[in-house]
Image: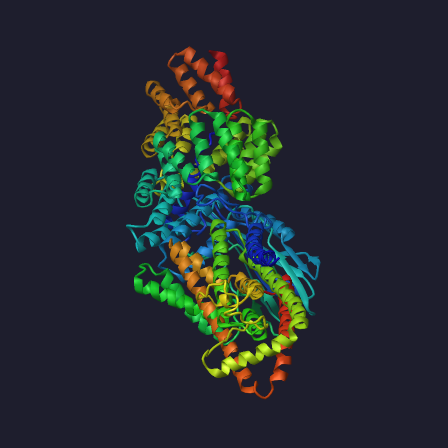
Amino acid sequence: MSAVRRCATATVLGIAVLGGVLIGATPASAHPLGNATVNHYHGLHLYPDRVVDKAVVDAAEIPTLQRKSRIDGGGDGVVDAADSTAYAASQCEGMAASTELVVDGARAQFAVISAAYAERPGAIRLVSGRLTCELEAKVDLTDNADVAFASRWDGAGIGWHEITAQATGLTLQGSPFPATSISNELTNYPNDLLSAPLDVREGRLATEPGSGSSTYAAAAALPLAGPIAPLLQKVTNVFDEQVGAENLTVWVALLAMFLAVVLGAGHALLPGHGKTIMAAYLVGRRGRMRDVVAVGATVTLTHTASVLVLGVVLSLGSTLAPTSATQTLAVVSGLIVTVVGLGLVVNAVRRRSANALAMESAARELALVSAGGDVPVAPHAHGYSHGHSHGFGQSHDHGPSHQHGHDHPHKDDSAMRRSWLVGLGVAGGLVPSPSALLVLLAAVALGRGAFGVLLVLAYGVGMAATLTTAGLLFVRLRDRLVSSRIGARASQLGTLTALLPFVTASLVLVVGLVLTLRALGGGL
Amino acid sequence: MRSSSSGRRWMFHGALIAAGAALIAVSVAGATTVASPQAEARPAPSETANPSAVVDPLAKDITRLQAEVRRTPGNKVAWASLALSYVQQAKVTVNPSYYPKAEEAVDRSLAIDSTDNASGLAALAALRSAQHDFKAARSAAMRGLRIAPYNATLYGALNDAATQLGDYREARRAAVKLNELSPGVPAFTRVSYSYELSGDIASARTALEQALSIADSPADQAFVRYYLGELEFSQGRPVDALDHYEAGLKIDPGYYALLQGKARAEAALGRVDDALRNYRAVVAAAPQPEYVIEFADYLQSLGRTAEAAEQRAVFAALNELFESNGVALDTDPTLFYADRGQADKALKYGAAGIKIRPFVEMADAYAWALHAAGRDVEASAWSEKALALGTRNALFHFHAGMIDASLGDEAGARSHLTRALSINPHFNPVHAPAARAALAAL
């Protein structure tokens, strides 16, 4: 034939048609993968002293025709009993020689116990051929043993490849092979729309002396920790159904948004690091409401941004393994926390020596304001007595901004504080939660990218809400603590509050280091 | 001093965010190879006898999409994407069992939404093209484009269908549009084919080399290598072709089309043992009618008549399997029976084929069938149609030359036969020597 390049579709006409032919034409005896296939089955049976392999090779019409001159040894055009016997013997010898069985690192040799070949009518006037080989290998499995098996015979073409394993007088541990054949030894192939043709050619298992059962290592669902997890899983399922629903009505959209918020809030409740750091920070630095909100907002924005970036890249390239990306992000997150912690420690040490006294008076002031009851939540907790320059620095205009009441050094400190807060927020939001990523990708796959972005944002808001609530609770708790005891133990508290920043800064640093190490170790 | 200190902190603050963003980008970029989007003409690495072969992103896609439609069975886009992946997997792994699955997945997608479902129509178009129902493929692509006028996949499907239907202008327009919307491997390979059909080999090669330079996944690279090999071989450069096939096989050892090309190039270079070994491997693993005929011709040229007859029996069986289900292959059986002198059969397949697929290849095959039946005047007209685009195809010119010779047009015969052998002296192991003999006899 000429070497004319055809368009990609044209070259596969044959296959397309062949596929249609097979499925449609001969339902009773059809090979689901087409009549150009060679299908393989190995039924392993392990005993303490031997491994028996009942092997079947089911060749469809075309390969059987291609092998005709080899099968028909007499060359008379008819495959008689003698031809079948001779062909089966030679094929099974070949299979015994090429099939790999390795017990504790040592190759065991299969021998042919029996061999049979039979043809049966197939499509049009063609036949298909079924080779059955019983192989046996003498091995010692009386003690714990490691057994590896690999089918290497005649497997170049397309076809079904199945292996089963059972045991008598032994227990199979972590067997990759089920005990029973889902194709009933290549006589009845399942052909589910959502399953790929079986292609199992090798595997490894461990044996123990004993009962004779098998633990088939089927794929398990990803485990989620904690009591909240099962509930969250349920919410996730409801959510997925809603987003995947065909007609996205306003109500469904609102419901989806609401569920995204709930999911985000729930995610923030699961074991993690964000809350710990934030709580420690806020307690230590006597955070204000706006600090709490700042962290929450940064978490939301960073989280949304990182999910979006990862989502965009993921939808561009499907070859990315998301776990490797999230692991890297976890390392980055850990490093940022470490850097922030380091900065806080340095800060705390410096400030403490410079402002120990001022702090004490600030604590007193704070308590007074709080006790006066006019500011219910958090007074401005700048922590350092730079003095309030109301009426002093007249050049400022007294706008609504809180900061305008303070002189420049304080502003400087605010900027500093903001940068730590942003750092913490970035660290808290940098690792995209898989569920948020899933939400986005699902929405993108549905052609609702914009809605997906909205959902991720809602998810971040949910996260931030939990974090903020937790932060506010801490702030309130601390205020109570301060106001109830301040009168009696002002000086003691002063010492305590002066120490706290240093302690919590160290805590943040330690958490950062632990997170980094954990991420590097792969235990995300 | 104050402002500088404050500025420094804001810089730190900004740097923190920038560093975070950069690290996201770097970590993500490091972990991924961005695949060409929507490349339904692009096969991915196959399931191979060698389990340690390249990781198969297509299989991963399929697993992911299967999980997705299980979770959201009402998701028309996921069903359509799954259907496209099944079609692609069928092509790549030469595994027909994926076609009925693709059909069912397309049905599911279109059952969910039959009016506003561009993805479903794109999948339908790809599937129908793969099944050689090009009219249905074109109409599905056009329907889709009315809904989604900027869908690159649909332009790809339209290009494929229009090419096979002989509407080269529409095909070219679709290829240009595809290239505008989504320049990448699928666009460049289609543009290349368009050039090749018009005889502009240099541009066809440039487009493929461009495709190779941007092909970053192993699947894309192997795919482009195959077409570069095919292009070089068709222009009489088996050494260059062999280089491409081997480079492709290094990337994906389970790509049977590459192995078949390699066998053909080795045959042209006189490496008989290699050629035989590789041809045998190909027809055992992927007995496509086209491969089987080619192997039969090669065995014939080596004087291995009995083995050639065996392969021809396999082809006849394949052909009969199709026929018993009401499906006629077109170019392959037409040329096969015309070569064997079975004019009636050749004409039957040729006449049916030209209706389904009025493509230059089919016109050439039909001309050859008419020639076998002794109807050389009609044959000449069809042969002219086959060459009307200026395609540099040695087999087309060989057929034209032999038809001219039968008509007594010695000048025409000499010109065509000379041209056939100058384009590719190895165009066919049986016909190339026949062309030389005929030329000598003129």
Q: Nearer the viewer, residue A381 or A60?
A: A381
Q: Which quadrant of the figure has residue B277?
A: top right
Q: Nearer the viewer, residue B132 or A340?
A: A340
Q: Residue furthest right?
A: A106
Above/below status of A399 relative to B169: below
Q: Nearer the viewer, residue B388 or B290?
A: B388
Q: Nearer the viewer, residue B79 or A197?
A: B79
x and y percent of residue B392 in the render?
46, 23
x and y percent of residue B332 in the render?
42, 33
Whether residue B291 is visible to the viewer of this picture, yes or no, is: yes
Above/below status of A184 relative to A144: above
x and y percent of residue A508 in the render?
62, 69
Whether residue B340 is visible to the viewer of this picture, yes or no, is: no
Total number of numbered labels? 0
x and y percent of residue A35 in the render?
45, 46
Above/below status of B193 relative to A99: above
Q: Residue at x 50, y 49 (%)?
A: A317
Quadrant of image for the N terminus of chain B: bottom right
Q: Residue at x 46, y 45 (%)?
A: B37
Colouring convention used in this rendered image of the protein: rainbow
Position of residue B12 in the picture relative to residue A183 (left or right): right
Q: Which quadrant of the figure has residue B243?
A: top right
Q: Residue furthest bottom?
A: A488
Position of residue B386 in the picture relative to residue B206 (left or right): left
Q: Residue furthest left?
A: B115
